């Protein structure tokens, strides 16, 4: 018998009620459309996909950008959603 697959609690972020966290973009590959944010609170890096960046059309963030975001879990671990640039590069 094989071991059961782990289950994950997934949810959709309610962007109106969820607290916004802040951090700095550590790395973002615009060709692949993903990267990582280093949270200001010192916790583990957070994955960000281009679909999680607020905006219309082409969405991009740059290494060193100061951002705010909502932390969600889509079943593959925590990731940033509703990402907004909050200032220039650090």
Image: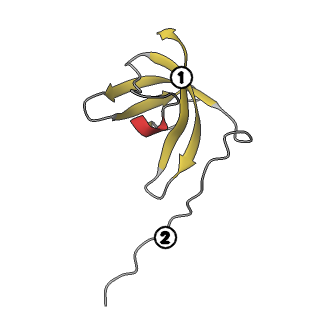
Position of 73 relative to 24 (above/below): below
Residue 19 in view, yes or no: yes
Q: Nearer the viewer, residue 2 or 16?
A: 16
Residue 49 in view, yes or no: no
**Splitting the image into 4 quarters, where does residue 18 fall?**
top right
Return the mark for residue 67. 1
In front: label 2 or label 1: 1
In the rendered image, the residue lying farthest to the front is: 57
In the rendered image, the residue lying farthest to the bottom is: 1
Task: Find residue 75 and report its horizontal and vertical position in percent.
Answer: 47, 59
Return the mark for residue 10. none
Task: Find residue 3 and report its horizontal and vertical position in percent.
Answer: 36, 81
CA separation in Å, label 2 and label 1: 30 Å
In the rendered image, the residue lying farthest to the left is: 31
Secondary structure beneath dot 1 equals: strand
Whichever of labels 2 and 1 marks the residue nearer the N terminus, that label is: 2
Position of 87 relative to 53 (above/below): above
Residue at 46 percent across and 16 percent down: it is 65
Q: How is the protein colored in the picture?
A: secondary structure
Residue at 51 percent across and 27 percent down: it is 55
Residue at 53 percent across and 25 percent down: it is 23
Residue at 51 percent across and 65 percent down: it is 8
Position of 39 relative to 49 (above/below): above
Task: Find residue 16 and report its horizontal and vertical position in percent.
Answer: 72, 39
Within 10 Å of disc 2 (Cα), the crowding (few <14, some 14-19, many 20+) is: few
Q: Is residue 12 left or right of residue 32?
A: right
Return the mark for residue 7. 2
Pointer 2 and pointer 1: residues touching (CB < 8 Å)? no
Quadrant including the N terminus: bottom left
Task: Find residue 72 and report its horizontal and vertical position in percent.
Answer: 56, 47
Q: Nearer the viewer, residue 53 or 5?
A: 53
Secondary structure beneath dot 2 equals: loop
């Amino acid at each position: 018998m094989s071991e059961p697959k782990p289950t994950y609690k997934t949810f959709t972020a309610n962007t109106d009620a969820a607290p916004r966290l802040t951090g700095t973009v550590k790395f973002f590959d615009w060709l692949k459309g993903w990267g990582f944010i280093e949270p200001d609170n010192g916790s583990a890096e957070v994955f960000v996909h281009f679909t999680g960046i607020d905006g219309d059309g082409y969405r991009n963030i740059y290494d060193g950008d100061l951002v705010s975001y909502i932390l969600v879990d889509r079943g593959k671990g925590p990731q940033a959603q509703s990402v907004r640039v909050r200032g220039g590069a650090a």
